[in-house]
Image (tube, rainbow, N blue to C red):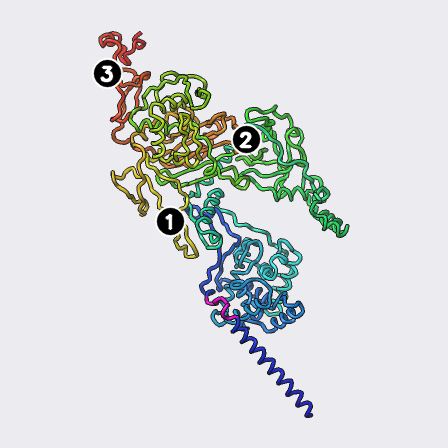
Amino acid sequence: MKYLRTLIFSAVWLVISLGAAAALGVVGAALYFAPGLPDVRQLQDFELQTPLRIYTRDGQLIGEFGEERRMPVDFEDIPEPMLQALMAAEDSAFFEHPGVDPKGLARAAVELVSSGGDIQSGGSTITMQVARNYLLTLDRTFTRKLREILLSLQMEQILTKQEIMELYVNKIFLGHRAYGIAAAAEVYYDKPLDELTLAQHAMIAGLPKAPSAFNPLANAERALIRRNWILFRMRELGYIDQSAYDEAVQAPITASRHVAKAEVQADYVAEMARQFATDRFGDEAYTGSYRITTTIDSELQPMARQALANGLIAYDTRHGWRGPEDTEIPQSLAEAQEKTERTGLEEELSESPEVMETARRAAERSQTSVEGVDGDVSNWLQVLERTPTYGPLEPAIVVKSEGREMQVLAHEGELITLSWDGLDWAAPYKSARYRGASPSSASEIASRGDLVRILQREDGSWRLSQQPGAEGSLVVMDPQTGAILALQAGFDFDASKFNRAIQARRQAGSIFKPFIYLAGLNSGEVTPATVINDAPVVLNDGSNELWRPSNSSGDFLGPTRLRIGLARSRNLVTIRLLQNIGLSRTIDFLVDFGFSRDRLPNGLSLALGSASLTPLEMTNAYAVLANGGFRVSPWFIEKITQGEQQTLVEEASPRVACRDCSEGQTTTEIDGKTYEVAPRVANERAVYLLRDMLRDVVERGTARRALALERTDIVGKTGTTNDQRDAWFAGFNGDYAATVWVGKDDNTPTAEYGAQAALPIWVDFMAQALAGKPENIPEQPPGIITARVDANSGRLLRDGQGGGVEELFDEDHMPTVQPRRVESAVERHSGSQGTGAYEAIF
């Protein structure tokens, strides 16, 4: 009996001693680690990292950048089934324990001893997971575990259980860039949290332990097992009854990946904004909850994107078929596997023949059939799934190509028949200037197993197409403010991320000529009626060879009024005009106008648009013409805000045009905001005269296709560079300035003029953008008068003289009067009052 008492006493003493030692250990650890622990109080003000988001000016999403997709949720908004599922999976005693679970720690201790110091699981409570995710590293060490325990105990003293749970559900990584339960609901089910089923709540609750291993998209079988285990736990804990359990465990896996799509497709602008943000904020741009509102108009941008795509496809169709994107694609996965390149798989395949055999069987079990197609099409469908759609062009695989009909397999197993009117354009492409003979049957175009592109027409039918061989850009600006309203810098961003609007410096060609004319008009030394000889010229350009420029038509008009010279884009008239004004003087004017001096060639080739400029630079120059001569600058970021409260970080303050401002006025108010007035860089009268001359380009010159718009307020200029490498059209009305460029990235010829390749795109866009808008023509400024001039000499006719043509002039810069070459009496007697020339009499 004495022995028993001694044994009990010793045991009790041992327990007390061990407890005291443990307590002393905890106290010692706390004293040792406390100075290096992060401050738990910072969690009360913790702001979740959210990605950079880019919006149009009216709040439509155009881009999102950042590795983490987050949608913060408050505790009261967590559905009860989700809360219960998380507790069943991770910590059923969450609302009872003080931050740590002794039983879980005991399991961790056993692992610690057996693994030699490396903790594999660790019995972490939800509180401990929050401590690790927010304040500690993710390494699995004994030291980190002790710090985690201490932090958890502190956290429970400072934060409520509800606050800790809220932090947890918003921080946990749940695979596929989804951080937090609300983001996971969108990514996997495309639903808000409160619309998920019980089975879906349980599926998401199973992800925190191993987001990859239990992911329903990557490992459906393992995910299903874990989901049903969580449902079993929920029933055992009394969270759900038997009927709810029976229904949920039988539910199929319904998860599929849902990527947030932009509301407006403006990928090039989104990338411009991303680059600006990273330059401004560094890596914090991706995590700092920044929101960039651009100047992009959500209605105009889709119009620009569609117009450019339509125009490039039309250009490509005119130049012929370059063949399928891929050929002889295996129809089934089993067939594709037999043809798979084995390089890089040596180690796996050398392990056992069973590896290849099981892989083959898995491929055979993946057979997929489509009604109307013979055999297994599993590989064709896989190829179509991973082949991107470019613009409106969808990938398709040829199933049958016989006679004058082609059957193709499209996305989701749709079988489409292409009739001959959707195929007959496909004469073989030989060069930009030459096509082969037109096809006589579909088999000459593509064969079974070929990957092609198809395009749906407005009537719902389909036609064969291909990714265009030419590229393009369309930029639209508000001429009053310089704001970029739409920008499409290529056929498709996914096909090519090169931003041609701001990065492609190409010769401007004839769209630069108006600025040479404006330099002359602004000087007051020439008028629209000034006559310059359109005749051959030989010049020394500083090289060993003489420069003999010519007109694109190869002919010469002789003495030509400037209005006609611009309307018909006469090269030699423009060169002589530049000579008359003076090269140095003209360059000074152009630099003041807004062009960069180092981008302007110091030679007479400047008159023909030899300066290499971007589409954005040319759009901005035409915006200055459109606003009456105020030097606005292009901008596209309206404001930057941060956080849920959208705290203003930066806001644009552009200089704007102001026709109604008095001389010397430096600011003006627009929509309640004050802006600085942009400097005037060209005389208002000179700009008005040039605009009127540009109208002749539309009515009687190279841009007559724009008459299809049936508007009198649009003006513009076509442009084509040497060897037809670049095709341009730039134009405007009072609402929009827009420029289209079409060319090839390798600078080879397009073999088309600006009026053929670029102008139809501009017309297509403007037809949509101006639909329903009233005409916007600037008021004629004071000092502009109308007078008659002799059609040949450009000189004024006297009152009472008949004939001649009407012309606009700045009243301060009038031409001289046409001298009489015949006596007045003879004129009166002959009845041929007019120019006074003999040919008018006889």
Q: In the rendered image, which residue does mark 2 sit on?
A: 316
Q: Secondary structure at mark 1?
A: strand
Q: Are there few (<14), some (14-19), or many (20+) residues within 10 Å of tag 2?
A: many
Q: Main secondary structure of the magenta part?
A: helix
- Quarter of the figure that contains the C terminus: top left
- Name the mark on residue 651: 1
Instruction: Identify the mark nearer the N-term, 2 or 3.
Output: 2
The residue drawn where x is 56% and y is 37% is 393
Q: Are there few (<14), some (14-19), or many (20+) residues within 10 Å of tag 3?
A: few
- Quarter of the figure that contains the N terminus: bottom right
Q: Secondary structure at mark 3?
A: loop
Q: CA distance from mark 2 to mark 1?
A: 42 Å
Q: Secondary structure at mark 2?
A: helix
Residue 79 makes an appearance in the image: no
Q: Position of residue 426 (x, y in %)?
A: 59, 28
The kind of residue on which mark 2 rests is Asp
Q: In the rendered image, which residue does mark 3 sit on?
A: 800
311 lies left or right of 420: left
Q: Position of residue 619 (x, y in %)?
A: 41, 35
Of circles 3 and 1, which is in front?
1
Above or below, 368 against 711 in this view is below
In this rendered view, identify the residue nearer to me: 595 or 515.
595
Q: Which residues are magenta?
A: 33-41
The kind of residue on which mark 3 rests is Gly
Q: CA distance from mark 2 to mark 3?
A: 57 Å
